Amino acid sequence: MAESENRKERFWDPVAGFGVTFRTMFKKVVTEQYPFEKTPTAPRFHGRHQLNRWPDGLEKCIGCELCAWACPADAIYVEGGNNTEDERFSPGERFGRVYQINYLRCILCGLCIEACPTRALTMTNEYELADTTRADLIYEKSDLLAPLLPGMEQPPHPMRLGADEGDYYRGAYSAPAPSERGPK
Ligand code: SF4
Ligand code: SF4
């Protein structure tokens, strides 16, 4: 009995091992060639944040800091500023003068975008957030603001879509700002 088992180990097991190799050679390759070929994420994937704009280019952020208070990782820093008639960045009284997200801390949980009352803050599908220095992983407002699309104008500028912020918030403009991407 021991002798027959020994013979099986010596002759059959190596052949069986090569059998696995040959079968695998003809299967579809599953290795992902990242970063040369990028696979799209799930549509609701939580990636880098974006600060959205109204269709006239004004910023949706009102500097309320609710996102910063909601963040469990203390990754967001906001300082609000006052709009004036001569220098307006958002409809209403306040805007986000300083806005930072520290991606060394952020766990991409999405609680901040749930807390945002104006849908200023959403998350994109962008996941390539690695960098070579710690400082470069603190994203400033200029890194997070949505790009200006056709029809938008770089703030500061007056409200182009109505007489007051209520016109913006009441949804007089049924189409969402085209800059909005990603899930809420
Ligand atoms: S996704 Fe989560 S951890 Fe990251 S900034 Fe928002 S609340 Fe904080
Ligand atoms: S992103 Fe939203 S929650 Fe955060 S400060 Fe701006 S308006 Fe407030």
Image: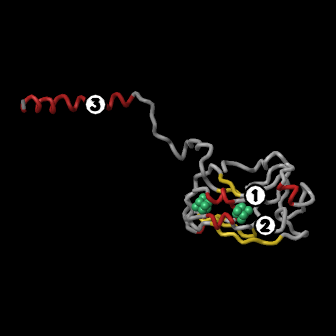
Q: Quadrant of residue 14?
A: top left
Check disc 3 and report the residue beneath it.
18
Which residue is more in the foreground, 170 or 42? 170
Distance between mark 3 and mark 2 Cα atoms: 66 Å
The kind of residue tagged 3 is Phe
Query: Residue 93 location, x and y as percent?
Result: 83, 68
Q: Earlier in the sequence, mark 3 or mark 1?
A: 3
Q: Is residue 145 visible?
A: no
Residue position marked by numbered label 1 in the rendering: 118
Q: Are marks 2 and 1 in contact (CB under 8 Å)?
A: no
- Callout in the foreground (3, 2): 2
Task: Give whichever of discs 2 and 1 has the lower sequence position.
Answer: 2
Q: Secondary structure at mark 1?
A: loop
Residue at 84% across, 53% down = 170
> Which SS class for mark 2?
strand
Q: Quadrant of the N terminus?
A: top left
Q: Position of residue 165 (x, y in %)?
A: 86, 60
Q: Amino acid at mark 2?
A: Phe
Of marks 2 and 1, the one in the foreground: 1
In front of the other: label 3 or label 1?
Answer: 1
Q: Is mark 1 within 8 Å of ligand 2?
A: yes
Q: Earlier in the sequence, mark 3 or mark 2?
A: 3
Which residue is identified by label 2? 95
130 displayed left or right of 173: left
